[in-house]
Amino acid sequence: MDYLYSGPENSDITFVYAHGAGAHMDSKFMERVAEGLGEHGIRVVRFEFPYMQKRRETGKKRPPDRTPKLLNAWRDVIADLGGPDKLFIGGKSLGGRMATMVAQELEVEETPVRGVLVTGYPFHPLGKSEKEYLRTEHLMELKTPTLICQGARDSFGWWDEVVTYGLPDIIDFHWADDGDHDLKPRVLSGRTMKENQLEAVDAMANWLKEKAAT
């Protein structure tokens, strides 16, 4: 497994950050979050799922691996980086969803991670927000501290949709004003994507430091 590191090696906080379905671990979004957290003194480790590694090697687009393979990859990374009790885990979209799923499994095994942090959780497939399509069942059982940074108009889960889900209090939210799935606002909002992303990074850093101290 190849890793990409940001932030100080001697940090008390290590956050393992997985990519979304279609972008590499060194995408502009991932880079801004990882480098931003590094500037806050947090060690960030990025990795790629097997399908994305093959895409990088061949240059050919591939669909994401099936869920069991993605979860096994997460488990391998967690073990490789020192075990769940040493790590905060999370990711962008797909990577973050898989992180919440493996975190819930590790809770059942009584070996929980320190916390979970997601940027742009895909609460439902694009254009399918009906109840039968929601990806929230395991979230209802989650007991690990979790932060979701979500655009208020994310097409995979708008603010006015998500607040009706009845998610447990262990899940905190940071809402990016007028943000889409990459936290990008519309021009008419008067905000910029960089502003939204940097505010999200600040919220993530503060949350990580707060949870690490408890």
Image (spheres, rainbow, N blue to C red):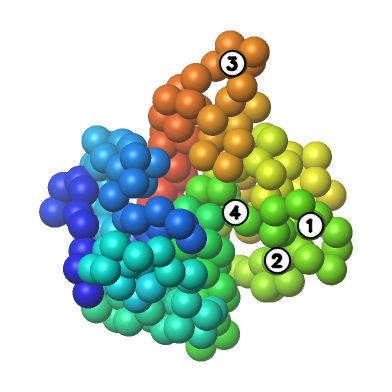
> What label does residue 128 carry, if any?
1
Is 30 situated left or right of 130 in this image? left
Secondary structure under the numbered disc 1 in the rendered image: loop
> How far is disc 1 from disc 2 in space, using C-alphas?
11 Å
Pointer 2 with pointer 4, Cβ within 8 A = no
Q: Residues within 10 Å of mark 3 (few under 14, many from 20)?
A: few
Is 39 situated left or right of 49 in this image? left
For the image, the number of numbered tags is: 4
Q: Give the residue type at disc 4.
A: Tyr
Q: Earlier in the sequence, mark 1 or mark 3?
A: 1
Image quadrant where one finds the N terminus:
bottom left
Q: Residues within 10 Å of mark 1 (few under 14, many from 20)?
A: some
Taking the spot 41% from the left edge, 48% from the top edge, the residue there is: 208
| Residue behind mark 4 | 121
Q: Earlier in the sequence, mark 4 or mark 3?
A: 4
Q: Give the residue type at disc 1.
A: Lys
